[in-house]
Image (cartoon, rainbow, N blue to C red):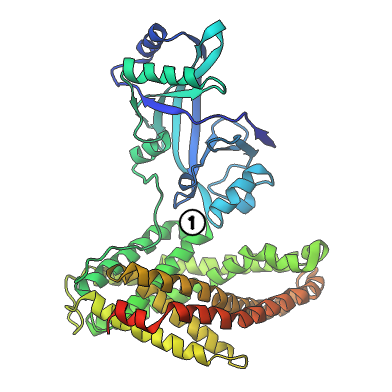
């Protein structure tokens, strides 16, 4: 069921003084304005967003009203509200929403992230119509007295607010009403929307949890201090994403854990002469183990996320025949996820996290590079990794083994992590073109490698698929899928030369020497 409301212009929110109760507020408005009271109501709803605040960032607001038939309502300034019946669940992926306007609007914003409950707000709301000439409604007012509802039902009052809403065609009357509210009654503009106020009161972050590590390091920062800051931020990102990984809220939680682990391993590799060798070697081994632990589920996540694209290669009829394969992938993911959860809750992983935290909290490193400025150490590594990339990439031709492209991709990740984690101490005009060039090159190399992994995974499942009910038909339908994957892999390989040439232009030797040291 889809529902469209009339377009609602952006309201202006003002805060009501704490000393002004509902009766006094109504009396004051009726003294200064020509108003008629409308209905009063109780609004009880759960406000929703992704873990990283994507809806708020896009100017959207999603609510799940209480007491209604499992609806989600999406509000956007200057657009109709979008509403759809959605079964109640602990999280909602865009792919799980019913077809329609709600899903179409949310899908490109959420991507792989889930819509999660952020906070519950219960409000008493009194509506009023502001009247003009001939008793026509020229503006609308809502007096709202909201409460944060905590788990268990405990309520916390939030600041009461007045929302003034314009009526189309009465802009001057709206402005005059706003002047009365601000100048005559002394009401101040709300510093933040109700969503932000409620989430802050609940102890959360309205903007969501950032999963990208971006630090501003002053030039001259000791390398051990810079490493500690970066490792500390990375372990924070891993820790904050662990609950969502264990609850399986969306695939990005596990992805962000893996990226943090991979980046920490890169820091230990690239800044190898900073920490105590034995502690560094131990942590590198444990993070390598953790990376392997998380790999199978992530690989299967990618397969399932790309399933619509995979099945599109065979048409609707054959896509239905492939369903046993999708079900087999999902069951395999369930088994691998059970192993992952045991591992993440196990002693070894907890010990690895403690070792990571300990190395990040060390005040000083004993290695020979510890007291050197980070721009000297990181700059040297950037130049070396970049030179190796240019050398190795320049040797790759049409007959080079796939491993050569895979190795170049891994080296590109090392360079990108160095630039993203420590790039703040270098000129931005040098860092940005390199990062942009790397992203474009990595897209091609990543596509080449992902297709190889997909083909290998699907090939390995053929025997299991053959004994599934309706498995033989799925095997026949799988053939065109494998052909399409291999064709796309080859297309990526052909695109490599142009992408590498563009990257080489961004990595001009004179510019690199000037920006990252001689």
In this view, 359 is above or below 52: below
Q: Nearer the viewer, residue 223 or 435?
A: 435
- The image shows residue 337 at horizontal and vertical percentages of 53, 66
Q: Residue at x 63, y 33 (%)?
A: 69
Q: Nearer the viewer, residue 479 or 218?
A: 218
Left or right of 386 on screen, residue 277: left
Q: Residue at x 58, y 88 (%)?
A: 402
Q: Which residue is mark 1?
A: 247
Left or right of 404 on screen, residue 149: left
- The image shows residue 489 at horizontal and vertical percentages of 65, 79
Which element type, helix, strand or loop, lies under badge 1?
helix
Left or right of 329 on screen, residue 392: left
Q: Residue at x 56, y 6 (%)?
A: 134
Q: Residue at x 35, y 75 (%)?
A: 418
Any part of residue 124 in sight: yes
- The image quarter in which residue 488 lies: bottom right
């Amino acid at each position: 069921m889809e529902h469209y409301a009339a377009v609602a212009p952006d309201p202006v929110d003002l805060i009501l003084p704490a000393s002004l109760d509902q009766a006094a507020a109504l009396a004051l408005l009726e003294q200064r304005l020509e108003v008629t009271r409308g209905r009063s109501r109780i609004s009880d709803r759960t406000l929703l967003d992704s873990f990283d605040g994507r809806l708020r960032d896009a100017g959207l607001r999603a609510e799940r009203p209480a007491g209604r038939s499992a609806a989600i309502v999406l509000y956007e300034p200057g657009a109709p509200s979008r509403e759809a019946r959605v079964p109640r669940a602990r999280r909602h992926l865009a792919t799980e929403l019913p077809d329609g306007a709600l899903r179409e609007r949310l899908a490109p914003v959420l991507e792989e992230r889930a819509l999660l409950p952020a906070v519950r707000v219960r409000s008493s709301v009194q509506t009023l119509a502001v009247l003009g000439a001939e008793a026509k409604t020229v503006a609308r007012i809502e007096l709202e007295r909201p409460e944060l509802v905590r788990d268990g039902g405990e309520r916390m009052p939030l600041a009461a607010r007045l929302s003034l809403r314009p009526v189309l065609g009465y802009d001057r009357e709206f402005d005059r009403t706003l002047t009365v509210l601000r100048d005559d009654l002394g009401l101040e503009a709300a510093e933040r929307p109700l969503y932000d106020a409620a989430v802050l009161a609940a102890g959360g972050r309205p903007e969501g949890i950032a999963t990208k590590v971006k630090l501003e390091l002053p030039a001259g920062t000791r390398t051990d201090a810079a490493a500690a800051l970066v490792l500390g931020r990375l372990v924070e990102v891993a820790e904050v994403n662990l609950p969502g990984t264990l609850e399986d809220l969306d695939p990005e939680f596990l992805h962000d854990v893996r990226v943090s682990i991979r980046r920490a391993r890169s820091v230990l590799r690239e800044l190898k002469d900073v920490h105590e060798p034995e502690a560094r070697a131990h942590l590198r081994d444990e993070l390598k183990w953790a990376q392997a632990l998380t790999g199978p589920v992530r690989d299967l996540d990618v397969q399932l996320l790309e399933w619509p694209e995979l099945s599109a290669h065979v048409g609707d009829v054959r896509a239905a025949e492939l369903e046993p394969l999708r079900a087999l992938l999902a069951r395999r993911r369930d088994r691998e996820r059970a192993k992952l959860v045991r591992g993440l809750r196990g002693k070894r992983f907890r010990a690895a996290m403690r070792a990571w935290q300990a190395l990040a909290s060390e005040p000083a490193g004993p290695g020979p590079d510890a007291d050197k400025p980070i721009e000297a150490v990181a700059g040297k590594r950037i130049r070396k990794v970049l030179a190796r990339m240019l050398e190795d990439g320049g040797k790759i031709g049409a007959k080079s083994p796939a491993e050569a492209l895979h190795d170049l991709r891994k080296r590109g990740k090392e360079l990108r992590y160095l630039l993203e984690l420590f790039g703040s101490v270098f000129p931005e005009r040098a860092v940005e073109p390199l990062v942009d060039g790397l992203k474009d090159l990595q897209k091609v190399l990543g596509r080449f490698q992902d297709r190889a992994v997909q083909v290998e995974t699907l090939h390995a499942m053929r025997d299991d698929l053959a004994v599934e009910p309706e498995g033989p038909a799925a095997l026949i339908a799988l053939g065109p899928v494998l052909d399409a994957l291999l064709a796309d892999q080859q297309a990526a390989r052909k695109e490599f030369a142009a992408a590498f040439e563009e990257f080489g232009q961004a990595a001009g030797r004179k510019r690199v020497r000037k920006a990252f040291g001689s």
